[in-house]
Image (cartoon, rainbow, N blue to C red):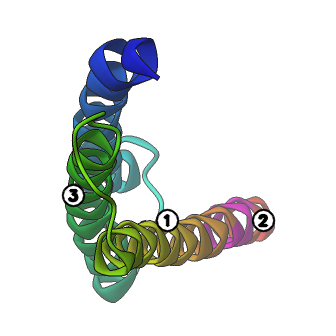
Amino acid sequence: MDVYRTRVLLIDIGFAISLSATSASLWLILPGVLDVLVPPWLVMVGVTMSAPYGLFDLAEDMVLFLLMDRLRVVQASDAMAASTFTIGKMLAVSLSVFGIAIFVALSVLTMRVERII
């Protein structure tokens, strides 16, 4: 547990920050680079879900770090906090993936319409 607590969780914190920043950046950059008409609301959903994902993941990691302390007595509320952050993280990722699915569908539709015109 000590290796997970002191090494893996630190890597996961870096991953959460990187994934959140990369996701937001891609949502802001890709529509213009690919020259695809993406509704502004869809870009806003993608960017907006990137921040909560990162925050929930960081909060989850901090709670897990505390829970894995050998001297700490784990309370039910501690486990509930970790579970809540995990659910929030999964919800944010799910909404972002849903947004990506719409983005891909719009990209394909745009390419097909351009071929017709």
The spot of residue 4 in percent (x, y) is 44, 21
Kindly state the secondary structure of the residue where label 1 is placed. helix
The spot of residue 25 in percent (x, y) is 24, 44
Q: Quadrant of residue 47?
A: bottom left
Q: Amino acid at mark 1?
A: Val
Inter-mark Cα distance, 1 to 2 = 29 Å
Task: Based on the picture, tell me whether residue 17 belongs to the magenta stretch.
Answer: no
Inter-mark Cα distance, 3 to 2 = 43 Å
Inter-mark Cα distance, 3 to 1 = 15 Å
The residue under the point 78% across, 65% down is 112
Q: Amino acid at mark 2?
A: Arg
The residue range painted magenta reads 105-111
The spot of residue 60 in percent (x, y) is 31, 56
In this view, 90 is above or below 69: below
The spot of residue 42 in percent (x, y) is 39, 80
Question: Is the C-beta separation of discs 3 and 1 under 8 Å?
Answer: no
For mark 2, does the 10 Å Cα neighbourhood hold few (<14), some (14 to 19), or many (20 or more) residues?
Answer: few
Residue linked to disc 2: 112
Question: Between tags 3 and 1, which lies in front?
Answer: 3
Kindly state the secondary structure of the residue where label 3 is placed. helix
